[in-house]
Image: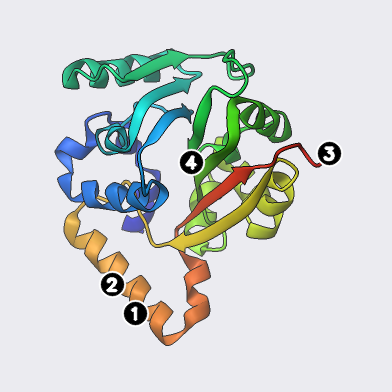
Amino acid sequence: LDILDDLAGSHRFDPFLLEHKPFLVPVYDGIFKEWFPAPAESLLDIGCGTGLYWPVLQKYVRNLVGVDSSPAMIEEASSLIRKHGWSHVRAMPYDGESLDFPAGSFDVVLCMDVLHHIHNLDGALQQFHRLLKPGGRLLAMEPNVLNPLIYIAHLIPEEERHAIIRNTAPRLRRLLSPYFEDIRIQYDFLVMSISSEARLRQVNRLGRFLTRIFPPFKYMGFRQTLSMRKRNKPAR
């Protein structure tokens, strides 16, 4: 059950997590390197929390704005910005409903473990569509509830249970496709809050081995990474 502690541990909100666990830097860097073959001009990070992955993400973005409905999280993110002296990164509170930016403000909207927390997801997707420039991208990471450990970890806390309802690939595609196209969903054995480098290597090694001997096992990855492009016009 140690892995469940890793999946649910509150230490994953530490804004200085990457300083305490530098072995996670290449994990995040691998994700962002695939998403950003070239730097993005402007990115809106929805539900940014403490911005714990910003030390890696900020290298791939010329202007980064993070928003979160928790003032405490924004204060933590702001402390991270101040410590690093980033002039191209901002952290802003928002009410969880309206995003008061002009239409077409961003090249990228990013949601890291956020979509399953949004109750009115259709309304949020409409806003993301409005905020993106033509051809802009929505990038997301979400828990994969096809994995039994992830299912259990999201069954226990009430605020996580929307993942169980929404987070199968067919369901996500149906929700996203009115606003986005070229939807790509990949699976990875990523445990972002894992407690040690040795355990991270063990999990990745086991995942790769099981996928090699039984290819459909890839669908049991802990995380789904999603990338898609804005439709010119919503399909509904």
**Numbered circles on residues, count:** 4
Q: Name the kind of residue labelled 3 in the image.
A: Arg
**Any part of residue 68 in sight:** yes
**Any part of residue 5 in sight:** no
Q: Is residue 171 above or below residue 140?
A: below
The residue to which callout 1 is attached is 209
Q: Label 2 vs label 4: CA separation? A: 24 Å
**Which sits earlier in the primary sequence, circle 3 or circle 4?**
4
Q: Residue at x 42, y 61 (%)?
A: 188
Q: Position of residue 46 (x, y in %)?
A: 50, 29
Q: Is residue 209 above or below residue 42?
A: below
Whether tag 1 and tag 4 are in contact, CB under 8 A, the answer is: no
Q: Label 1 vs label 3: CA separation? A: 43 Å
Q: Label 2 vs label 3: CA separation? A: 43 Å
Q: Which disc, if any, is residue 123?
A: none
Q: Residue at x 18, y 22 (%)?
A: 84
**Within 10 angstroms of label 2, few (less than 14), some, or many (20 or more) residues?**
few
Whether tag 1 and tag 3 are in contact, CB under 8 A, the answer is: no
Q: Name the kind of residue labelled 1 in the image.
A: Phe
**Within 10 angstroms of label 4, few (less than 14), some, or many (20 or more) residues?**
some
Q: Position of residue 208 (x, y in %)?
A: 35, 74
User: Which quadrant of the figure has residue 130?
Assistant: top right
Q: Position of residue 227 (x, y in %)?
A: 53, 49
Q: Label 1 vs label 4: CA separation? A: 26 Å
Q: Which disc, if any, is residue 113?
A: 4
**Which sits earlier in the primary sequence, circle 2 or circle 4?**
4
Q: Name the kind of residue labelled 2 in the image.
A: Arg
User: Which quadrant of the figure has residue 18?
Assistant: top left
The residue to which callout 2 is attached is 205
The residue to which callout 3 is attached is 236
